[in-house]
Amino acid sequence: MCDLDDDNFYDTNDKKNILTFHRKKNNIPSEDEWIQRQTKQTSTEVYLKKSVEADLFKEKTLNGFPWTCASLCKGHINLGIRYFIQPPVDLVSDLDALKMNGEQEEMCAIKYSLLVTVLLHNDDELTVDNKYLKSFQKVIKEIYPKIKTDFTMETLKDNLPKLMPRYLKTITIQK
């Protein structure tokens, strides 16, 4: 069994092979290939700089390295390393939809409010306690005033795992 979310799942050689595959699939030359063909090429041709490639191998990604490489090479190569650092558009639109759906669906409201609560407590260790519950209740009341706010600790403990792996990498809930 292997954990695909493990930061060490792909070593540098794996990442290089994945990036090379997607780069070649989308006809994007490496900087070395571009320099070799430079007499034939225009200066506006897109290529992958060595510095960007080196940075990519160090970067942790939100949606996994292979998916991000594929997406980068399909149409975002000009963004370079910024594409890995910025949240993907589909994640942003997914969060927007989750917030909007929370107006009608209590489960979406709970998930979105939990994400906001986690963000507000970003510097703190994620410990589900009364302080965290009160913070969550305040957040959900502010964002969704029509939704009941008498949630229990069990509501948090039951719903936090539902945010993985899409929104949260890992959480530990003490029983």
Image (spheres, helix red, strand yellow):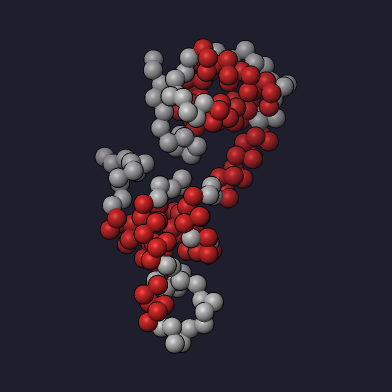
Look at the picture and state if 78 lies above or below 60: below
Is residue 74 visible in the rendered image? The answer is no
- Quarter of the figure with residue 147: top right
Tell me if 145 is positioned left or right of 166 in this view. right
Q: Quadrant of residue 169?
A: top left
Horizontal and vertical percent for residue 78?
53, 64
**Total marks placed:** 0
Residue 58 place in picture, x, y as percent: 36, 52
Identify the residue shown where x is 38% and y is 77%. Answer: 33
Residue appearing at x 51%, y 12% in the figure? 130
Reply above or below: 104 against 68.
above
> Looking at the image, which is closer to me, 107 or 77?
77
| Image point (45%, 59%), residue name | 70
Question: Image height check: is 160 above or below 56?
Answer: above
36 lies left or right of 109: left
Q: Position of residue 154 (x, y in %)?
A: 50, 15
Q: Can you say whether 9 is above or below 141 in the image?
A: below
**Given the current orientation, which residue lies at the most extreme bottom position?**
39
Q: Is residue 146 visible?
A: yes
